[in-house]
Amino acid sequence: MSEAVSNTLLDGTRGPARTLTDRVYRRLRDDIIHGRLEPGSKLRIEPLRQQYEVGATPLREALSRLTSEGFVSSEGQRGFRVSEVSTEDLMDITNMRITLEGMALAQSIIKGDDTWESNVVAAFHRLTKVEMAAEPDLIDWEARNAEFHLALISACTSSWLRRFYDVLYDQHKRYRNMARVARDARRDIHGEHTAIKDAALKRDAKAALAANELHIRRTAEVCTPALAEIMAKRANA
Amino acid sequence: MSEAVSNTLLDGTRGPARTLTDRVYRRLRDDIIHGRLEPGSKLRIEPLRQQYEVGATPLREALSRLTSEGFVSSEGQRGFRVSEVSTEDLMDITNMRITLEGMALAQSIIKGDDTWESNVVAAFHRLTKVEMAAEPDLIDWEARNAEFHLALISACTSSWLRRFYDVLYDQHKRYRNMARVARDARRDIHGEHTAIKDAALKRDAKAALAANELHIRRTAEVCTPALAEIMAKRANA
DNA sequence: ATCAATACTTTTATCGATTTTTTTTACTAT
DNA sequence: ATAGTAAAAAAAATCGATAAAAGTATTGAT
């Protein structure tokens, strides 16, 4: 049993993957987010079937779900393809994420209890440990980062807001991975995270949202030139 | 060829339904939104197969898509069921719709050009005609109403905002249909629509958002008691 | 009577094969 | 050459059947 594209996955999806559909969904999602499946490329059923070692039904089901989440686009009778990327889309996602994550954060700051506070502190601590490590593991960092941001908004009561946030976070993550800027030396990511955490725990919503916006915008800014380069290279081919 | 649950559909989905999956997706969606498929009820494959006259594959694919949009919930190896309704969910959807539709409206007011203006006026006119009709056709009203609200935000440039709006609009529509309050005599819906339109065309974003919020909130308010009644009745059975 | 283990039934999830549609290729007339 | 058309190939969509899992009823021991 050879795993061609991906094997391990540390994505945002929670709970056990009970069905084959679930597993192939997660692997496809992971492969798209991590750029192993190129934006715009065709997702043909037969090759994928063989690669992931599944039948057509679970595969199509997984692709359908990914279509609803915007990772895959489909046109009737013309199959599926990996969703395109663009600077406009990155901007759109960035702005939406700032707004929605801001809303969720504001709610959390109002509603968050002691458990929320300690979860934030704990997640921040775990993230810090990875950030300070001599040789930082990217996969690990990704997971801890997601955990930290999730902890911050975990006291948000709106499940629809959470649902939309999850989609946007992972969409943004795709762009981040494309530019391979999980950790940019020139940026003080740890400082940015600290600012968000401190403001949140002080229940200073305004400062927290501002710090969060700055954090997200800086991340996006680092992605933009790398993305532009990738787009240019693609335009030639 | 007998159509058991639904035949005609005037849903928000655009473009032709090229594939069987598409058609069954739209019909299921329509049947859920219009309450023909009861919240919480099991969606068994075999009966649905026969009812909609399709194979298991397109059916499951449609159900998967609906799961991503929140109309259907699924648990591994335990099949699909129609998503539950609750007053909390209605409140959540209402608040989210107010915020996101507000954002989209504000963007439209800033960016909208002459074409946008004339589209709003035209959609308002068509809606007015249906509203003023002696015997108002509910299906027709639904479509014109959606058209009007869509015209208002049509100059919004964020496709993610549009995507989320679409989901929320239809989710809200489900609750509206449950309470069968598409047209409530005691409410001056036409007046509410007029207020939104006028403020939008005057480019008064603040007033437009306020009028829109009032409109959505009033609609939700009418739904709440009817929903509570339905929930109570269900609790007994 | 109660509980647990087991056989049976129903339902879900999955596969391999078939049908339908699109895309590519080859051919012909202008 | 070029455009149009027909045949062939490739790919997508779909189906019917099978395997796996969950749920239900039955039996027997305490």
Image: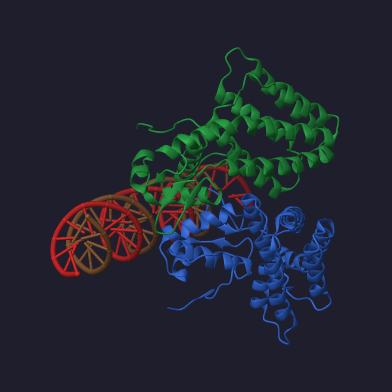
Chain colours: A blue, B green, C brown, D red
> Whole-percent x and y of residue A145?
69, 71
* Quarter occupied by the C terminus of chain A: bottom right
The image quadrant that residue A66 belongs to is bottom right
The image quadrant that residue B102 belongs to is top right
The residue under the point 77% across, 31% down is B211
Judging depth in this view, the residue of A182 and D22 nearest the camera is D22
Judging depth in this view, the residue of D23 and A217 nearest the camera is D23
Q: Is residue C23 left or right of residue A131?
A: left
The image quadrant that residue A183 belongs to is bottom right
**Residue A225 shows in this picture:** no
* Quarter occupied by the N terminus of chain A: bottom left
Rendered view: B113 above or below A125: above
> Whole-percent x and y of residue B119?
74, 29
Judging depth in this view, the residue of B188 and B107 nearest the camera is B188
Residue at the extreme top:
B134
> Whole-percent x and y of residue A221?
81, 65
Judging depth in this view, the residue of D8 and B220 nearest the camera is B220
**Residue A151 shows in this picture:** yes
> Whole-percent x and y of residue B143?
60, 29
The residue under the point 72% across, 85% down is A133
Rendered view: C29 above or below A60: above
Rendered view: A212 above or below A190: above
